[in-house]
Amino acid sequence: MKVVFLDRDGVINQYPGDRLYVTSLKKFRFLPGAKKAIALLSSKGFKIFVASNQAGVGKKVYAQKTLDTITSRIIEGIKQAGGEIAKVYYCTHRKEAGCSCRKPKPGLLRKAAREFKLNLKEAFFVGDTIRDVLTAHAVGAKSILVLCGKEKLSNQKNWEARPDFIFQDLFAAAKFLTR
């Protein structure tokens, strides 16, 4: 089974900025080409999951209900574009909670693997931070860093891990994965 995990902010939607959150539907904006990318991956038989830290809920910056509303909008927008998300996994814990699901810990990916009987060594993880790269590496998945969110190439010398692949955005990554 072909599997892709996607981070949310900075991959699917516009990155809100360091220490900021997408706190309402009004603040949610799909990145150009993101829906098209997910539709392409879906059409080529990829099972697609979202795995994202959303500590704003744990910090009470926004409510779980707001996160659920935004998630419904994401799934609906992707579906209308011809794509499909198998399931969305969020870690809503604060960093200091020490949970096993907050990336770079791989709990979200392992949970998906158990629920869907996935071989994570054959999976790809597309993210916009080195934390996402570390998450992929923790389970033996291939990491894809996209440069349309938080991380910049100019910061390479400070990276604590190297991504397997680097692309400008999710659509470029999807074209590579479906070639």
Image (cartoon, helix red, strand yellow):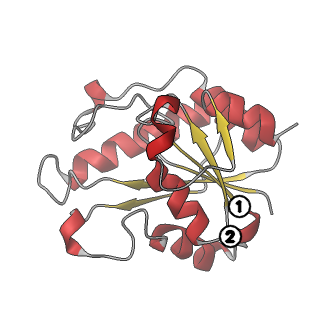
Gap in angstroms between the C-alphas marked 1 and 2 = 5 Å
Is 147 on the left-hand or right-hand side of 13?
Answer: right
**Dot 2 corresponds to which residue?**
120
Give the answer, above or below, for where 114 lies relative to 58.
below
**Dot 1 corresponds to which residue?**
123
Which quadrant of the rendered structure holds the N terminus? bottom right
Is 47 on the left-hand or right-hand side of 7?
Answer: right
Number of numbered discs: 2
Residue 169 figure quarter: top right
Residue 79 figure quarter: top right
Residue 51, image x, y percentages? 48, 56
The residue that appears at 79% across and 36% down in the rendered structure is 176
Q: Which mark is residue 82?
A: none
* Residue at the front extreme, as displayed: 157
- Mark 1 touches mark 2? (CB < 8 Å): yes
Looking at the picture, tell me which residue is in the foreground, 161 or 24.
Answer: 161
The residue that appears at 41% across and 62% down in the rendered structure is 103
Q: Amino acid at mark 2?
A: Leu
* Residue at the left extreme, as displayed: 60
User: Which structural element holds mark 1?
Assistant: loop
Which quadrant of the rendered structure holds the C terminus? top right
Give the answer, above or below, for where 86 lies relative to 177.
below
Give the answer, above or below, for where 11 lies relative to 71.
above
Looking at the picture, tell me which residue is in the foreground, 62 or 19.
Answer: 19
* Residue at the top extreme, as displayed: 32
Disc 1 crowd rating (10 Å Cα; few below 14, some 14-19, many 20+) is many
Residue 42, image x, y percentages? 73, 43
- Residue 73 visible in rendering: yes
Residue 27, image x, y percentages? 28, 27
- Residue 82 visible in rendering: no
Q: Amino acid at mark 1?
A: Ala
